[in-house]
C-alpha cells in the first residue's frame, strides 16, 4: 500500500492521483461524515485486542459463557456480516425464525449490543469503516454523487479480493461517470 503511490508518481509525475487502501479511504471519508452514523469525527479505530476485550465484556454481560462463545469466534462472524453489509438489525431479521442454530441466535444478541457500545465509545473496527461508508453512500445519493465528481476515475487492484461492502463503495462512487478499471486474478 505504501509502495503504490511511489509507483504512480513515477509513472505520472506531477499529476494529482490519490492512491489508498479501502480502509484508509473510508477512514478519511468517515472523519468528515462520522456524525451521519452517530460518531464524532475524532472517532477511534479499535485494534484487535480492544475489539476482543469489548466483545468479551458484551458476551459476559449478556450472560453467555466466553469459553463456549469465544470473542474470536463471535467477532469473526460479526466481521463476515459487516463485510456482507449485514447490520445487526438485518442479522436479527435474517436469523430470527431460523431454528437449530444457537450460535446465530447468540450473535443476534451480541452483535447489536456490541455495535451500540462501539458507537457509545466513539469507536469503530476496520470492518465498520467499510460498512458505514457503504451504508452512507447507499442512503445518500447526493453524497455518492459528490464523491463521484471528486473521484471521476477509479481503479481497484486485486479486485478478486473485493468483498460486498467494498464493491458497493466502488459502485456508488463510479456510478455517475462509469470510469472504473479493475485488475485481478481470474481465480
Image (cartoon, rainbow, N blue to C red):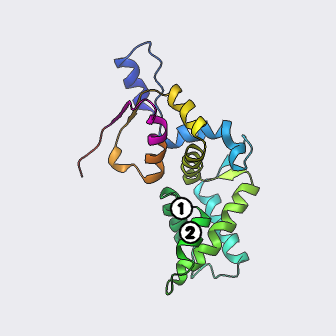
Q: Position of residue 172 (x, y in %)?
A: 48, 40
**Most foreground residue, 96 or 123:** 96
**Crowd class of label 2 (few under 14; some 14 to 19; many from 20; radius 10 Å):** many
Please tell me whether residue 44 is drawn above or below residue 60 in the rendered image. above
Compared across the picture, whether 178 is left or right of 114 comes to left
Compared across the picture, whether 183 is left or right of 145 comes to left
Magenta range: 170-182
Q: Residue at x 54, y 81 (%)?
A: 97
Element on which disc 2 rests? helix
Contact between labelled residues 1 and 2, with CB atoms less than 8 Å apart:
yes
Q: Position of residue 5 (x, y in %)?
A: 43, 27
Element on which disc 1 rests? loop
Compared across the picture, whether 3 is left or right of 147 comes to left
Q: Position of residue 129 (x, y in %)?
A: 58, 48
**Residue 70, quarter of picture:** bottom right
First of labels 2, 1 by sequence position: 1
* Total numbered circles: 2
**Most foreground residue, 25 or 1:** 25
Please tell me whether residue 151 is drawn above or below residue 60 in the rendered image. above
Q: As drawn, which residue projects farthest toward the top?
A: 14
Q: Which residue is mark 1?
A: 86
**Crowd class of label 1 (few under 14; some 14 to 19; many from 20; radius 10 Å):** some
Q: Position of residue 173 (x, y in %)?
A: 48, 36
Q: Residue at x 47, y 59 (%)?
A: 84
Q: Which mark is residue 162?
A: none
Please tell me whether residue 98 is drawn above or below residue 124 in the rendered image. below
Tell me, yes or no, if residue 163 can be seen here: yes
Q: Residue at x 57, y 66 (%)?
A: 90
Q: Residue at x 58, y 73 (%)?
A: 107
Tell me, yes or no, if residue 71 can be seen here: no
Q: Which residue is mark 2?
A: 91
Amino acid at each position: 500500500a505504501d509502495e503504490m503511490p511511489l509507483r504512480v508518481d513515477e509513472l505520472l509525475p506531477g499529476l494529482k492521483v490519490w492512491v489508498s487502501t479501502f480502509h484508509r479511504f473510508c477512514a478519511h471519508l468517515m472523519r468528515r461524515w462520522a456524525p451521519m452514523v452517530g460518531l464524532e469525527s475524532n472517532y477511534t479505530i479499535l485494534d484487535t485486542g480492544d475489539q476482543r476485550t469489548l466483545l468479551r465484556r458484551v458476551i459476559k454481560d449478556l450472560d453467555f459463557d466466553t469459553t463456549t462463545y469465544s470473542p474470536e469466534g463471535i467477532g469473526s462472524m460479526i466481521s463476515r456480516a459487516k463485510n456482507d453489509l449485514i447490520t445487526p438489525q438485518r442479522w436479527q431479521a435474517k436469523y430470527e425464525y431460523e431454528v437449530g442454530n444457537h450460535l446465530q441466535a447468540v450473535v443476534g444478541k451480541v452483535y447489536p449490543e456490541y455495535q451500540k457500545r462501539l458507537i457509545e465509545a466513539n469507536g469503530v473496527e476496520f470492518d465498520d469503516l467499510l460498512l458505514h461508508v457503504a451504508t452512507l453512500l447507499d442512503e445518500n445519493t447526493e453524497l455518492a454523487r459528490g464523491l463521484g465528481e471528486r473521484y471521476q476515475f477509479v481503479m481497484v487492484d486485486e479486485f478478486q479480493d473485493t468483498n460486498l461492502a467494498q464493491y458497493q463503495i466502488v459502485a456508488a462512487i463510479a456510478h455517475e461517470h462509469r470510469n472504473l478499471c479493475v485488475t485481478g486474478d481470474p481465480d
